[in-house]
Amino acid sequence: MSNLYSLKAQLPAVFISKSQIESRVNTLAEEIKDFYLSQDDFDNESIIVIGVLKGAFIFTADLIRALKLPTQLEFVRIASYGDSTKSDGILNIPDLVLPNNIINKHILIVEDIVDTGKTAGFLKQYIQDQFNPKSLKLASLLSKPSRREVEIEPDFYGFEIEDKFVIGYGLDFGERYRELDYLGILNES
Ligand code: 5GP
């Protein structure tokens, strides 16, 4: 028992709560759905949703369930932080294999956070070049505009935040905290 208590004492304070996330993800899904339904060439085909691992896995799972449109789910794995809280700008791309049947479709990239913009910028360009999509959009749970180094903005985002290192709801620090059902800020407990 004492172990559980001390673990609880170490939990980061709530920055964005579970219910705030839930409600924002639902309205975001509505916005995204409206966009696709307004496309002349949309015809209720599957949207290709590409989640960026590992950080976006929970957001992607919640978003596709709230979207209530047919989707084909793919994941790519890209990492730039390692164990630190500042990106060194070097992208590590262990798994960027995508199937050929996503050529010329409506594609939605789902990111956890757009920080410097390097990951999203790279991925958008790569997908545009390789798969010639009918539309290519970027949805991000979070956006940190003050850190931007690459000219890119998410087409849809949940929350705009200042330059703080956020953890929880899929986002980690050194592979910890992904399981928290809320967003906290590292070292602000
Ligand atoms: P970029 O700098 O390329 O926009 O962001 C790359 C990745 O860095 C994000 O997808 C995310 O995984 C990670 N990252 C950026 N800011 C934060 C943050 O505040 N917290 C966590 N846990 N990861 C972050």
Image: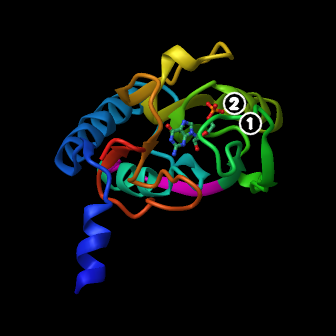
Splitting the image into 4 quarters, where does residue 5 fall?
bottom left
Q: Is residue 19 left or right of residue 174?
A: left
Type of amino acid under label 1: Ile
Picture disc at residue 124 = 2
- The kind of secondary structure element at disc 2 is helix
What's drawn in magenta, residue-wise? 67-75
Q: Dot 1: within a 10 Å radius of its alpha carbon, few (fewer than 14), some, or many (20 or more) residues?
A: some
- Is 132 one of the magenta-colored residues? no
Splitting the image into 4 quarters, where does residue 21 fall?
top left
Q: Nearer the viewer, residue 121 or 86?
A: 86
Q: Dot 2: within a 10 Å radius of its alpha carbon, few (fewer than 14), some, or many (20 or more) residues?
A: some
Q: Nearer the viewer, residue 9 or 121?
A: 9
CA gap between label 1 and label 2 equals 5 Å
* Residue appearing at x 63%, y 40% in the figure: 105
Q: Relative to residue 8, is residue 62 depicted above or below? A: above
Q: Is mark 1 within 8 Å of ligand 1?
A: no
Q: Is residue 160 left or right of residue 100?
A: left
Do the residues bearing badges 1 and 2 touch, measured as CB atoms within 8 Å?
yes
* Residue appearing at x 32%, y 61% in the figure: 10
